Every structure is written in structure tokens, then in C-alpha cells.
Image (tube, coloured by chain):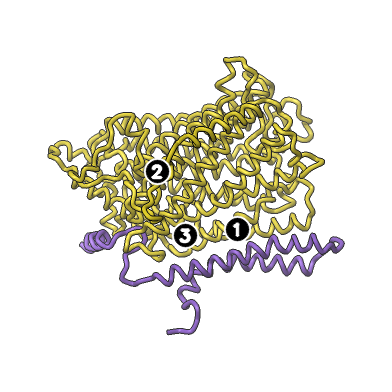
Amino acid sequence: MAALVGAVFLAALGFVARVNGWWGRLPFVDRTRVATDGGHAHEPGSGLAHKPSGITRWLTTVDHKDIGILYGMYGVIAFLWGGVSVMIMRFELFTAAETYISPEMYNALLTSHGITMLFLFGTPIIAAFSNYFVPLLIDADDMAFPRINAIAFWLLPPAALLIWAGFFTIPLDIAISPAQTSWTMYTPLSVEQSNPGVDLMLLGLHLTGVSATMGAINFIATIFTERGDDVTWANLDIFSWTILTQSGLILFAFPLLGSALIMLLLDRNFATTFFAVEGGGPILWQHLFWFFGHPEVYILVLPMMGLVSWILPKFAGRKLFGFKFVVYSTLAIGVLSFGVWAHHMFGSGMDPRIRASFMATSLAIAIPSAVKTFNWITTLWNGKVRLTAPMLFCIGFVANFVIGGITGVFLASVPVNLILHETYYVVGHFHYIVMGMIAFAGFGAIYYWFPIVTGRMYNRKLAKGHFWLSMIGVNITFFAMLLAGYFGMPRRYATYSDFNPELAPLTEITFLHQVMTAGAVIIAVGTILWLLNVVWSWKKGGKVTDPDPWNTKEYGLHGREFAWFEQQLAATDGGETESESAVATDGGADGESVATDGGSEQA
Amino acid sequence: MSDRIFDRETMLDLSVNFIPLGILLFFVLLFLVLAPFPGDPLIVLVQMSLVIIPGIALLMLTYYSGNAIEGSRDDEQAEPGYSEADAEVARSAGEE
């Protein structure tokens, strides 16, 4: 493996050396950067309006909207694999003993589920929204560096292939199997597993980090330098604020992960001792990993909070309550997120005084998070609430955050943490955040912006079915996890048939695992509904001809992205028939005369 | 014009970040008063730094972001996320 890595490196170096005059292709003239063709639409006749058709368009595009769609497609594929892997695990856990898959396969699926959902679904799906909409919201022509934007995306497919490589090679029988390190890759376990699949996964992870860092630099440059004349720091929208903060976090967190991954690769392949007992020690890995890992939580959740802060007021009929509170608390979370990493390591044996410090910062960071929750609730207060599908997901997001957030505050307390940390309680807590919040906000945003991206409306009945199945499924599955944690069910176990009944009651735990599996099936059914709805509606959904499909103008809440959409509709208005227009904003095929996804106003 | 760095309204906006700062300060004082373990200057330095450095970073970011936001505030400008033209359209539609 070491020789292989070295050969790849030398081959890449040789390739770069052979490209003559590469510097001449950079967009600089006399050391001044010149405007690039961002790939956005040009005036007809300008000679630049042409986009290649078919697959060539998608392989060569540097248009921020196209790249946003590519990120979205990528994130969805990853989400589906992450879902399939966890369903296999959940069916295995339906019974206490080993049934369908070996413990080794369970560990591999556990590892792949975690890494896929966090690195290949979570970060890219946020990049999908931010690529498409941040330039529109800040009135930029495109991203500051459109080609770097494309490179950042195209690093991701090979990253996924490397991360999943161990599964692809199972039928080949070439002694490369899936990594079984868990997503935390704790040493010494991750050093001692000789399987080359681990190296491939580490290389893939490194690529995702390079991709995320390039994207973050691009967003920081875009938001600082490409804003329209009438967009200042005072009226920058909340989604762009959260993307800016997230990009700052990525800038400090991901390079550190990359460094740690290289050290781990060196320990594995070149006998260095960064994480060996005689060297830096295994705890060094934990510190480096969680210095990245905890900000990663906020890298994923802050933009989703921004999406909810942007979408929820539209259907509450009111502006976001305390806009600046939300901005300042976003920045506060960004800073404090770098001071709490060792609350993941309270049981590792570190000095109790240092542990107390991490407890203090972990308790402090709960405040800005809670502030946002109260802002959302206060925005709803006395609002003219319309329960459209995006709004339902936003409200579900807030509700799930109350449970997921408060269970996290308990974990910040050292004595509680020491009891609960190795149990399903933690699994329940962070799944309320990751699935109950991050995925929910993603679904809400997909429904909200579906008319802009596709020009069509989704089926509202399927969308509402999707919401209720997801909401019920999430709360069944993850609340059962919290209870199993209280009963003492350890996490990461492939089987649980050998428990000491005095420590963990097998009957109750088996029942809770069955409840979790049932809940996961409900989530899966909801997700299938969503997938069918999106695919079908993209092709066959009613065309949207109303530039204000959510009736936001009525409330003075018409956002800049829908104003852009209005311009697009006006530019492409080429003789729609009356009958086509009539179904355009309905969102359902049942002929109801509802222009806003049926969101009936609630007093 | 007031000599104060931030006016009253801005201070109210920034107060959201004073609460976590207050919590950090509380713990610093608590650690100074209650120290049940044998004194070890290095450990105490690390312990205090882990609370104080994030606090200082938060204070600085709050100050600079407050300056940037309040410095570009203009009562005539559109709401966050809206263009002037759309804000006018939305306003007129809302008034009907």
C-alpha cells in the first residue's frame, strides 16, 4: 500500500510537470485577476450564452447553479447508501443474537454509515443549497472562483469511491475489505487494522477535506467581495451569514483533520509513532480528531439553522424575530465550537480540572443555541402560520432540536456524561440533531426551492406524508435510543445477547431495539415517498408560472432568490397556454385552487 | 453623536453573546475559589486558558462583527435577503 501511495503521488507529480505553461491559463492579466466566465446565463447574442448539451454540460460546468445541483445529486446518492447501510444494521439488531450479518460486516456498515452521512451527505447537501442560492441571495454573478468551485465538487466522486472501496472489492476477493474503524477512527484500533481498505478510506476522507476547504475559501471570498451594491453586512441574509460562519469553521477544522489523517496513514504504512504509546499516544488522536470533530457538528448544523431562519418566517407571515440575535449567536457558536472538543473524551482519563474547563465551555455554548430556538418560537407566536411542507419540516426541526439539544446539555455535565457516554443515549441525542434537524432542514429547503430549481411543483400530499412519516419515525427510533441508553445499552455492539441481566435488562432492551427498527422502517418509507415525489415531480409536476408560488409578497417577505426566479420566468415566457398556467402553482394533481402548497392559515 | 462605541440598541443586540461570556467568567471565578486538587501551575494554566481564550475570542468577534454590522447600517436599506425593488413590491402588495 505504501508503494502504491508513493507511485500515485509520483505519477501525479509527473503529470503536473508535463503540463506546459499552466500558469498562463490562470485568470490573471498583469497580476490582476480578471473576471471569469462564471457559467451563468449571458445575454442572448453575447456569444457566451451557449452551454453544451447532455452529459458534457454537467462534466464541464462552472455555473454555481449547476454545481449546486451536482452537489445535491451526490448528497442524495450518499444519503441513500447511508440509509441502506443503517437499515441492514437495524434488521440485524432486531434480535439480540447474530442473525443476518457477521459482526465484522456490522462494524463495516457502522463505519460506512457514519462517514457517509457526515462527509458525503451532510457537507455536500449544504454545499448544494449554498452553491445555488448564496450568489442569488447576495446578488453576485457567480462564486468568486467558479473553476475552483467545480474542482471542489469533482474531488468528491473519487473520494466516495475510495471511502466505499472496501465494499466494491468484496466480490473480487483481493484482500481489501471495508474499514471497521468507526467514523472516529480511534487509535490504536485504526493503526493496527492491516486491511488496505482503511488506507483507501483515509485517502478518500482526505479528498473530502480538500474539497470542503476549497469550497469554504470560495464562499468566504464570495461573501466578502462579490456582494451586490445594496447588500451590506447589516442586511446580509441569515443563510449567507451561517454559510460564512460555517466556511470559517471549515477553514480551521478540515486542514487539521487532513493533517491528522496523514499522520495516521504514516503510522499505518511507514512505522511512525505519532499515535503509538511510545510516541504521541492514542489520546493525541482523540484530541486532534475531536478538535475537528466537534466543529464539524456545527459545520453541519449552522447552515441548516440558517435555512430554517430563512424559510420559517415566510410561512409565519412575519419577519424573523431578533434577526441580529440569530446572527450574533451564530458567530458565538462558531467561536465556542473550537473550545468544547474534549467533552467527547471525558472518560479518557484526562485531568479533572481540564475536564471541568471543557464542561464550562460546553455549557456556555448551549446559550446561543437556545437563543435561536426561542427566536424561531417567537417568530411563530401570533404569526399567520401556513402549514406547507417546507414549514412542517421547519417546525419539526425546531421540535426535534428541543429534544436533541437538551439531551446534549446533560451530556456536557461531566458526571452525567461518564454514565451515559458509552450508551445509546448519545446515539439518540446526536441522531435527533443529525436526522431530526439537519436532514429535516434539508428536506424543507428542497421543497421550498423546488419551484426555482426545477420550474415545477412537487406533489403536496406525498410531501406531507413524507413529513409525518419522518417526524413519527424519527421520534420513535431516537427516543427509544435515549431510553435504551438509560437502561445501559452500550453503543456500537453488533449483538447484545450476552448481557449481565443485572446491568442491562435484556427483555426491555430487545423490545426497544425492535421499536427502533420499526421506527427506522417508517423513516425509510417516508424517504421513499420523498424520492418518488422529487423524481416524478421534476419530470411531470405542474409547471410553476407564478413567480411567487408561496404568496410571500402578501406578507412583505419576498426574498431575493424568488425575485431572480421572477426575472427568469419573464425571460423565458414564450407562450404558455392558459391551461398550463392554471395548474402551475397548485402543487397537487387534485385540482385544488391552492397557490401555496395548500398551507391553510392557522389563527 | 454619542461617545460610546455602541449605542443602546446595538448593545441590546450584542447582549446575546454576553450571556455565554458571563457563564465563562462564572466558571473562571469558581475554579479560582474552588480548587480541591493539589496545585500544579501548568494544569491550572491550561485549565484557565481553555475557558479564557474562547471567551476572549468571542469578545473580539462580537466587537468586530458588531462594528461591521452597525457601521453599514442604513435605515433606508432593504431588509436582509431582499433587494430594494422587491422590498418595494412586497411593501406595496402588503399594504393592499
Q: Position of residue A68 (x, y in %)?
A: 39, 41
- Using the image, determine if residue A453 lies above or below residue A341: above
Camera-nearest label, 1 or 2: 2
- Using the image, determine if residue A599 lies above or below residue A108: below
Please name whichever residue, B88 or A200, is drawn nearer the observer in this view of the structure.
Answer: A200
Q: State whether discs 3 and 1 lie on one chain.
A: yes
Q: Label 3 to label 1, Cα distance in Å?
A: 20 Å
Q: Chain of mark 1?
A: A
The chain drawn in purple is B
Quadrant in which the C terminus of chain A appears: bottom left
Quadrant in which the N terminus of chain A appears: top right
- Amino acid type indicated by mark 1: Leu
Check disc 1 and report the residue beneath it. Answer: A336
Check disc 2 and report the residue beneath it. Answer: A147
Q: Secondary structure at mark 3?
A: helix
Q: Which mark is residue A375?
A: 3
Upstream in the sequence, badge 3 or badge 2? 2
Q: Secondary structure at mark 2?
A: helix
* Residue A542 visible here: yes
Please name whichever residue, A271 or A98, is drawn nearer the observer in this view of the structure.
Answer: A271
Upstream in the sequence, badge 1 or badge 2? 2
Q: Chain of mark 2?
A: A
Q: Is residue A304 left or right of residue A562?
A: right
